[in-house]
Image (cartoon, rainbow, N blue to C red):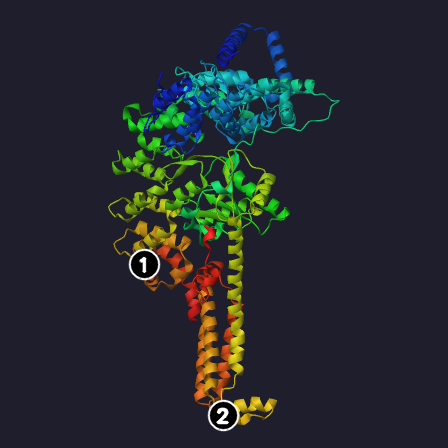
Amino acid sequence: MTARKRAKKTAKTTKRSAKKGATKTSSAAATKRSKTAAKRAVAGTEVVGYKAAWRVANNAKQSDDARTTALISLGSAACDDSDVFAGLIVLLRDTATSLAVRLGVLAALQAASFSTIRFAACRPTYMTALRAVAKDPAFEMRQRALGLLMREGDGRAQTMLIEGLENPAKALLPPEKALQLLAYDVKSEAYPLARRIVERPPNADAKREALRLLAADAKSTKLFERILRDKSETGDVRQISAAALQSLAPEALQTYARDMVLDHAESPELQTMSLTLLTQFGDADALTKDARLGERVAALHSSADSHAVKQGAEQFIGKYTRGSDADRA
Amino acid sequence: MTSPRLRQPMTESEFAAAITALGADTERRATLVSLLEETHALYDERGAAATVRMRGWVLSTLAQPVLSDAALVHMLEELESGRDPYLVAVAANALRRYPRAEPAFASYLTRAIANVRQHDDLVSLTAYGGYVDDEDDGTTAVAEALATLRWMGASAAGARQDLELLAEDHRRGELPTWMGREVDAILSAIRDSIDTTSPETECCALPGPLGRWWTSRDARRDPTAAQGIVLEDQQGERLRFDELFVGKPSFVVFFYTRCDNPRKCSLSIAKLATLQRAIDASGLSGQVRTAAITYDPAWDVPDRLLGYARQRGVRLDADHRMLRSDPASLPVIQRHFGLGVNYVESLVNRHRVEAFVTDATGRVAATFARLEWNDQEVVDRLRAVVDEASPDAGGARAALATRDVAARGRHTLSAMAPLASVGAAFIPKCLACWATYLSMVGVAGLERWTDTSWLRAGLLAVLAINLASLWVRARASGEWKPLHLGAAGASLILVATVAPALAWARIAGVALTIGASLLTVRIRPSAARSRQLARRTLVPALITPSKSDA
């Protein structure tokens, strides 16, 4: 039986049960029901719990709040029970169901997927459903689905995002979000696109995300060096470049950090970052003997306007002048 | 019908159509196997996901209508170390088109199930890219692997243990019902066919030496282009290719730390650690080297190489290193070894499992590609290369012997230093001193020793030898204090010869000279600097490589 057919059968059964429940009003029947429920409760409260929760979650007449609360309580039953799983997939794909409930379904499936061994049987169907809702009319559904797919290294999701960057008419997400998700796969074909976006960004967020994506590629080292040295670039972009160079060219970054500390016209943010870089990752031998740098840091420590710069200077002095003081003594 | 030409650049749609046409072209069909080489230009600058789609389409086309021997190793490779459900499904399905159910297939199929079970996917074996749009369509990698095991019937007996573990998982509720039923059916077929009265037959050799080839001495690639390349090891020490790989056979494996497939690079380096122990156990320790070279030199800086090796228990010393080349030199390394790797920008988009044995001249003598090597086959191949009797090997051994002589020469020079200093200390520096010495052996002939000019010449010569020895040692070690001390000592001794009244100068000079020599013997030069220096020592002829080493 296919998943769709199973879900339809379950839906019919649920309707029939609801009708039956509405017409039976006798106290005898009510007593019988409560006895049955009690038996089941003794046998396994989880079985009673999740089935009842599923009945609520799958009932369009219930409020969104009630349904999403019920979905949270499904736990591992979201996959363990094949009927529940099939029903969840149907709800996920159903654009007529409210967005809140569909996002609740996604959350329930995502929670179940953390148990990778138990979820293994459900994963193929789950991934196929995610690819379908990656093109959903609702933005939030698309964003969540694409995020989950990209974390799994899905090639189809990657193709969709790249197509959207190349042709905005096909874009499923804003460029900055697409770039952020593409960065999950360092082996994607997004690098030339990211470089174009750095040169001609549609917005500042997109430029930042493009730079973060490029940080995995050693061929981008020169680009990051140029941006780091360019004072016309914003502070956050220069800091992203510094972070990238820490992986790609750590020795060169030390030289730039030194230059930025010595530069009286450099911004406090970049000076603070530079002092931290030198303190954490610098060559202790060279820095201890660097008299010019030492004097500059001492001056910053005593007279910088920025508290963050002073703190950074203090940490540098604490690390690199203690040793030389001991020598002098 | 003429099949379209494969040209760069082409879209994936164009590629898919071209492959389909090639598959239908009986004359050109065989060229499809060449499209599975990672280095094929069609994969240049393709992302990893695109490479998977393209490879999958070639693999599935190759499997129709019959899977050839040439394509078999690629299918087994995907089953053994692949993680992409589409490629694993294609490969598992393809085995059912091989002319016979080889018993060796079974363990590859159960390995594939283990690799992909927890991130399986619905795939289409008929649509390019393998994607399905409906949960009711498609198949999964595990389903295909189990279907092929079912097809094998009794031939799957070699995987019985793995299948029984899966059955155990099913009893624990960790397998879906359909999968448990399949496993039970396969096990039943195996049990029904087992003849308990006949002895167990050996399982399960592959049909042919897949993924291995040995290159005869005459055919080995000339290493000249690679000789001058500088590689950096996990400690930041920089050595030339010939310093690393000439002189002894080596086992060289390729990897990179950003590899996201634990069945490839991580496993290869972990296996390198076990191979090192196997080499020791086989008695080849000291006769061979091992090395791991990264595909990703810009990213894999020494600290990363060191951490990666340590986490996997790899031994590191002068004969066992983790290496990276200069990124600009990587193409030379690729050509020398014939690597199976390609890139998108600086990132690896696809590579095969690969390792090599090089001979004592640095030439590739054996290749282990695509399928995991086992320690014994590598040790056997290393031993064969060590034992090679050939002019090249003789030259390599001569070079080794020459290097030993050079090393002994350097040690001799170093050993001379204290003797020279002691000699300088005890040579009489004045007539009275000579008189004292000679009186110890009798005064006969004393009147003949009144000429001291040759004494001074001899003293100068001995002091010069002492200082030269100290200089050689200082260049090798980078420690110049002994030379400075020796020079000071020699100066004081010379002062004492012209001003005998300055006894303190004589005593101080002797003390400084002896001290300098004793100090220099205690300092060990670095191996790299010794080799550099060996080219410029006073005895260059001893260490010049013979032409037969090339």
Horizontal side of residue B542 vs B165, given as left or right: left
Which label number is shown at residue B450? 2
Give the secondary structure at mark 2.
loop
Q: Where in the figure is residue B272, as x and y percent of width and height? A: 55, 43
Q: Residue at position x 58%, y 93% from top?
A: B444
Tell me which corner region of the image, top left, top right, bottom left or bottom right, holds residue B209. Answer: top right
Three-letter code, disc 2 = Thr
Q: Chain of mark 1?
A: A
Q: Is residue A97 above or below residue A287?
A: above
Q: Nearer the viewer, mark 1 or mark 2?
A: 2
Residue A272 appears anywhere in the view: yes
Residue B152 occupies quadrant: top right
Relative to A164, is B456 on the left or the right? right
Give the vertical position of B268 relative to A259 (above or below): above
Q: Amino acid at mark 1?
A: Leu
Q: Position of residue B246 (x, y in %)?
A: 49, 51
Indicate left or right for B401 with B550 as reference. Answer: right
Name the foreground residue: B493 vs A307: B493
Q: Is residue A77 visible?
A: no
Residue closer to the observer: B355 or A70: B355
| Label annotation for residue A300 | 1
* A227 is higher (above) or lower (below) than B115: below
Q: Is residue B496 left or right of residue A39?
A: left
